[in-house]
Image (spheres, rainbow, N blue to C red):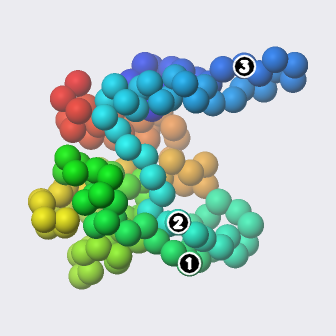
Amino acid sequence: MGLVFFEDKNYFLSPRIGDGKAVFDKSRIETFLLEKKIAIFDSAIEVIRQKGNASDAFLKVVKSLDLEDALRRDLPECHTLITTGEKAARILLDSSAEGLTPPPVGGRIRFELAERLVTLFRLPSSSRAFPMKIEEKAVIYRKILREILHD
């Protein structure tokens, strides 16, 4: 998000005192998300990493997000969903809109959920395990997010 909105991949990091390693600046992230009206949540609530790595191929979903309930209860104005990666898109669709196929990277589909029409966009996985340079991912993220947020 730092690269997409501020041309700086380290925008949401702040140096830690002592060891010099960077950490996420929670306050800066929260302020940004509130200003942009962006909510972030995992599509899977409980998972088992079967190989101990970041690959979705070895991710077993034990419990997925009840998206319909979350939209009704917590996000009554939400009409746009974004997943990063095919696995997240599949999890959401399997739990809320069975029979639909995830859109291609950079693509979208529309469907009815929680008594409203929602649009689901699929962006490239944010995982380091996904073999695309961060700058290439940022181009796709920027295009979709600026369209949605009218920036």
Amino acid type at image mark 3? Pro
Q: Judge whether 20 appears above or below 33 on screen.
A: above
Which of the numbered marks, if any, corresponds to residue 45? 2
In the image: residue 107, left or right of residue 17: left
Q: Amino acid at mark 1?
A: Val
The amino acid marked with disc number 2 is Ile
Confirm or deny contact between disc 1 and disc 2 (CB under 8 A).
yes
* Circle nearer the N terminus (2, 3): 3
Where in the figure is residue 125, as x and y percent of width and height? 47, 53
Question: Quadrant of the image for the N terminus?
Answer: top left
Up-down relation of residue 113 to residue 98 (above or below):
above
Task: Identify the disc placed on residue 62.
Answer: 1
Residue shown at the point (63%, 30%) measured from the top left = 24
Report the disc number at residue 15.
3
C-beta proximity under 8 Å, tags 3 and 1:
no
Residue situated in front as seen by the camera: 33 or 131: 33
Q: Secondary structure at mark 2?
A: strand
Quadrant occupied by the C terminus: top left
Between marks 3 and 1, how big is the CA–CA gap? 36 Å
Q: Nearer the viewer, residue 124 or 84?
A: 84
- Element type where label 3 sits in the image: strand
Q: Earlier in the sequence, mark 3 or mark 1?
A: 3
